[in-house]
Image (cartoon, grey):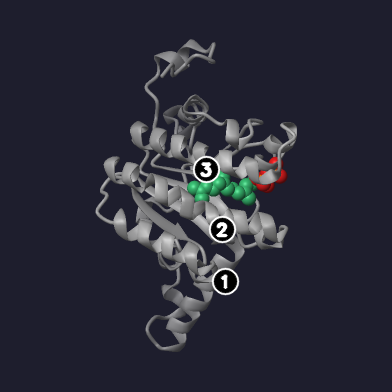
Amino acid sequence: MALFKTKTDMSVAQMQLKIPNHIAIIMDGNGRWAKRRLMPRVAGHKSAMNTVKKIATAASDLGVKVLTLYTFSTENWSRPSDEVNFLMQLPIDFFNDFVPDLIKNNIKVQVMGDIEGLPDATQISVKNAIKQTAQGTGMILNFALNYGGQIEIIEATKKLAQQVANGEILPDDIDETTFSQALQTGNLGSMAAPDLMIRTSGELRLSNFMPYQSAYSELYFTDILWPDYTAENLVEAIESFTLRDRRFGGLNDKIESEP
Ligand code: FPP
C-alpha cells in the first residue's frame, strides 16, 4: 500500500504512523453515490457493504484495536420501508459471506444498539456472528446497529438511577468511570472513546453518534462517498491523526507548560 502517495509534507512521510486504538466511522453518502450513477439508493448500500469488508480488513491489518461503524441509527427507521428492509437484510448478507474472513483475521464482532428492536432474521444473523467470532483476540468490529447516542445516555442514566434506588451505589459514586461503564461501550473499558472519528461524504456533523464517547475524539471529514472509500483513504485519515496534538484539555509541550 502506498502509504504517503497524496502527501507533499515530507515530515509525514518520515513519521511513523500513529495508529489510533479506536476508530469510529460515520459511513455516509451511499444514496448520493447511487444517484450519481442513476441507480436506486439501495445499490449504494450494497456497494457500501463491500467497502465495509475492505475497510475492516485494512483497519485490522493496520493494528487498529476497535473499529466502530455507524450502520443503522434509531432515526433511520423513518426512511421508506423498502430501503429499511434492504438495510435490515445487509447484515445477514454481510455475515453470511464474511464471517469466515473475520475468523481468519481474528476479528471479533460486537454490536451496540437495540438489537432486540431489529427484525428476527437480522437479530439471528447478528447474534450468530457475535457467537462465531467470540474467540477472536484481534480487532473488535463494533457495529452500531439501531443505535442512537442520546437514547444510549438516557438508558445509562436510568441504569445508574436504578442502582441508586436499589441502594447498590450512592449518587456520589456516579463519575466518568461508572457512567462510561453503563454505556453500550462499557465492555471496551479504556478503549471506549474513539481516538479518531471519520465521516465521509462532506457532511460536517456527528448525527447522534457516540456523543458521550466522542468528547475528545479527533474528527476527520472527507468529501469521499462511503462506497468509494478505500484503504488508502483510511491511511490518509490516520496520517492526519498522527499529526494532531492531543492535549485532552491539558498542555503537552514542555515549553508550553513552563511558566
Ligand atoms: C448513510 O448513507 C448510510 C446508511 C444509513 C447505511 C449505512 C450502511 C452501510 C454502510 C452498509 C452496511 C453494511 C453492513 C456490513 C451491514 P445515506 O444513505 O444517508 O447516503 P446519502 O446521504 O447520500 O443519502
Q: Judge whether 185 appears above or below 166 on screen.
A: above
Q: Name the residue tied to disc 2.
A: 88
Q: Give the structural element (helix, strand or loop) at label 3.
A: helix
Task: Mark yes or no: residue 237 visible.
Answer: yes
Q: Nearer the viewer, residue 194 or 55?
A: 55
Residue at position x 46%, y 76% from top?
160
The amino acid pointed to by label 1 is Ile
Looking at the image, tell me whether mark 3 or mark 2 is earlier in sequence order.
3
Looking at the image, tell me whether mark 2 or mark 1 is earlier in sequence order.
2
Near mark 1 (Cα within 10 A), the count class, few <14, some 14-19 or many ≥20, is few
For the residue with label 3, is its CB less than 8 Å from the closest atom of ligand 1?
yes
C-alpha span from label 3 to label 2 = 12 Å
Give left or right: position of 160 versus 39: left
Give left or right: position of 94 versus 223: left
Q: Name the residue tied to disc 3.
A: 49
Q: Nearer the viewer, residue 162 or 223?
A: 223
Give me the disc on residue 154. 1
Near mark 3 (Cα within 10 A), the count class, few <14, some 14-19 or many ≥20, is some
